[in-house]
Structures are given as structure tokens and as C-alpha cells.
Image: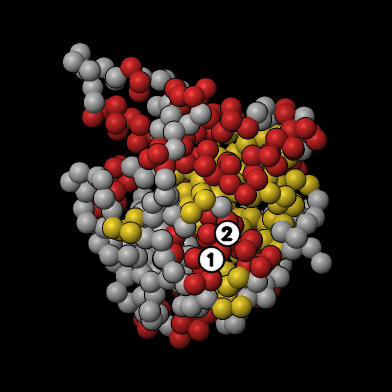
Amino acid sequence: MNPAPRRIAPLAITAQGLASAAGIGLAPLAKLLRAGGSALTPLTGLPAAPPCWAGRVPGLESAPLPAAWAEWDCRATRLAWQGLRADGFLTAAQAACARHGAGRVGLVLGTSASTIAASEQAYATLDADGSFPPALRSERLNTLHALAAFVQLATGLQGPCVTVSTACSSSAQAFAQAERWLRLDLADAVVVAGVDALCASLFFGFHALGLLAPTPCQPFAAARCGISIAEAAGYALLERGTGPWQLLGWGAANDAHHMSSPHPQGLGAERALDDALARSGLAAEDIDYLNLHGTATPLNDAVEAALVARRYSPGVYASASKGATGHAMGAAGIVEALVCGLALREELGSGSAGTAAVDPALGAVFAGQLRKAPSLCTARVAASHSFGFGGNNAVLIFGGSA
């Protein structure tokens, strides 16, 4: 068995930005969570789509990119741009370039679907000779790396740039990559991002797997029957030092059990938790607030609930925010990292929207840990779970300076 990783130095999160189904900026998300509400709505505008609910970012249809970037224009890049402009993040990223030099500011962007919706549209509107229409023929736009390339262009960053695509753990894994770059002095600041937009491939793919709920998702409820897909663009700027919100540790592990199902005992998830704790120098009992992966699928929720009940304190404040925002796929990790930031900085303990009662089969310990409604949470240390297809597991631990 591999030895436990060494403790790492905390990293300050000096700026953040978000576009989600709750609205543009962190304030609409905080308001939604405080009210215990949900931004999920019935899916419309997708022909032949199965009946389901989704987390759609408002206004993207009428918000094209600036004319100078017209060749990049599609739903996913519009979403990325809205997130960049939120909460003053673009200004903060450009200020980091001024402080450190653009070549010393890196970008790690997590995504599951990238700009595949643009490729779907191109295939649906082929020319008479079977080619993509001219407006959608861009080689740069129809690639997995398109979003990272666009964000790098829009921000002016010139440091290392990479796309991470490990399904639903993508933007959580991006924090790990950023920490390594800073520790190895490959960069002086790193933009961590997660962007995923709604597209047909996600809806039809999850429907084919029997994992798409026809009603709003219900994390950890007895009636849970699948996910509610969402879109989001989230950003965080990591730099060396301390601050009111810090990355304390991360863990990543792949259990290689199944393409779409978790290990029955959650071995990969537990290994990721162990490594995150080791890097932070903390114990599971030190975690005050826990944002659960909570997809609302029967098996995933059961495995995660068992892990929480056996490893965390019975008094930990745990919640599942996907009932409020939906499951933002590759962007889910950073959305839920931002929820942890709200818990630490604003004492905002989100509830688990859509969960009227915890499935009794998940046990009395877990039922006492999960908060169904929002309440005050005086957290000093927060953790976030992100578990993706193919056994890709990530756990992030955050804290604040004294």
C-alpha cells in the first residue's frame, strides 16, 4: 500500500466567480441556499428529450460573446464568459497577471462535455455535401480543450494551461493540479475553473443508463431515482499564503471498479478522503461542514452515506446541494467548493433541497448527519466530495485563517 502523502502548505483562494442555475454571481446562490429553494425547472427546448428537470443558467440564449470572439460563440463559451465576469473574477485574474506576470499564472479547467453542444448543432445542420456549416466549422471550437483555450484567451493568462476531464470529479481534480503547480513553482497563481453547459449528449446518455430522474432530484431520499442535470461555470484563484478561505488538502483515487457504478464499499472514495486528510494534517473528526456528492441515484447515495457514517463525526453538518443547483457534471466540483466557501465565510449551512426525509435504509447515524433544511453553520473546516464515472474520486478540504 502506498504511504500517506505529506502535509501541504495551505493555499489562499483570493477570488471566485460563478454562473449557475441560481443566477450570475455567488449572491444568488447564497440567497437560494438560505431559502432552502431549488433552481431546477422542467427541461424544454430539446426535441425528443425524456421528461426531466434541469438547472439552466438564465439568459445565455440572449448573451452572445463580444464580436471580437464571434468564432468562439456557443452556449458553453457564453457560459464560461458569464462566470468570468461574475463577482469581479476577471478583474482579479488580470490583476494576478499584473502582479506575477501573465506567464506565471496558470489555468486548470475541468469539464465533462466541453463544447460538444456546438458539435451536436453542426451535425444537425450539415451542408448539402455533408460538411459542418461554415459558422460551426472551427477546429478550435470542436475540441475538448476549447473551453480552456477560450478562457485563456479571454483572461490573457499565458502560464501552463490544461483541461481535466474525469467526469463529475473534473473541477475538483483541478484544485489538485493547481496545488501541485504552485508547490513545484511552475506558477505563482492558478485559475481553477469548471465549466459544463447543457447538451443533448448528457441528457440522452444518462437516460440510456437509467440515471435521469423524471422529477426534481431527491438526494438521499427513499424515493430517489436519478440525477437532475445542470450547467455552471465556476472559478477560483489560488495563490500561496493564507486568507479567510484556504485550500488545506486534497485527495484523489481511482477504484477502477466499474464504468458507471461506485465501488460497493466506496474504497476509492475512502482512499481519496484519507489522502486529503493527510495533506491537510487533520482528522475526519475535525470536519465541521461536509458537502456531499449526493447525486440522488440509489447506489451512489447509499455508498456515500455509508462512508460518511463510518468516518465522520456523528455531529458533522452534512448537506447535498445538487437538489438546489442540479448536477453540473464537470463543473460540480467547483460549484460545491464555492458552497464550502460560503459555509466558512458566511456561516451558511445549506440544506438538502428536495430531500423531505432521509431514506431509513441509510441508517440512523447518517440520518442525523444530513441537514434537510438550511441553518446556521459555524464551520472552521469544510470538506467536499466529488465522485465521478470510472471510479474517479476526489475530496477537497478547506479552512480559514485564524
Outermost residue toward the bottom in this view: 364
Q: Which of 154 and 393 is in front in this view?
A: 154
In this figure, which residue is indicated by the disc labeled 1? Answer: 31
- Residue 132 in view in this figure: yes
The residue drawn where x is 44% and y is 44% is 196
Residue 41: x and y in percent read 33, 59
Residue 115: x and y in percent read 41, 34
The residue drawn where x is 52% and y is 51% is 24
Identify the element where label 1 is drawn: helix
Q: How is the image coloured?
A: secondary structure
Write down the quadrant of residue 197 in the picture: top left
Outermost residue toward the front in this view: 62
The amino acid marked with disc number 2 is: Ala
The residue drawn where x is 47% and y is 41% is 79
Identify the element where label 2 is drawn: helix
The 10 Å Cα crowd at callout 2, few under 14, some 14 to 19, many 20 or more, is some
Q: Count up the numbered dots.
A: 2
Residue 355, numbered label: none
Q: Which of 34 and 187 is in front in this view?
A: 34
Residue 86: x and y in percent read 58, 46
- Placement of the N terminus among the 4 image quadrants: bottom right
The residue drawn where x is 48% and y is 31% is 65
Q: Which of 352 and 37 is in front in this view?
A: 37
The CA distance from mark 2 to mark 1 is 6 Å
Q: Do the residues labelled 2 and 1 touch (CB within 8 Å)?
A: yes
- Residue 193 in view in this figure: no
Residue 312: x and y in percent read 59, 75
- Placement of the C terminus among the 4 image quadrants: bottom right
The 10 Å Cα crowd at callout 1, few under 14, some 14 to 19, many 20 or more, is few
The amino acid marked with disc number 1 is: Lys
Apparent side of residue 94 relative to residue 368 in the rendered image (left or right)? right
In this figure, which residue is indicated by the disc labeled 2? Answer: 27
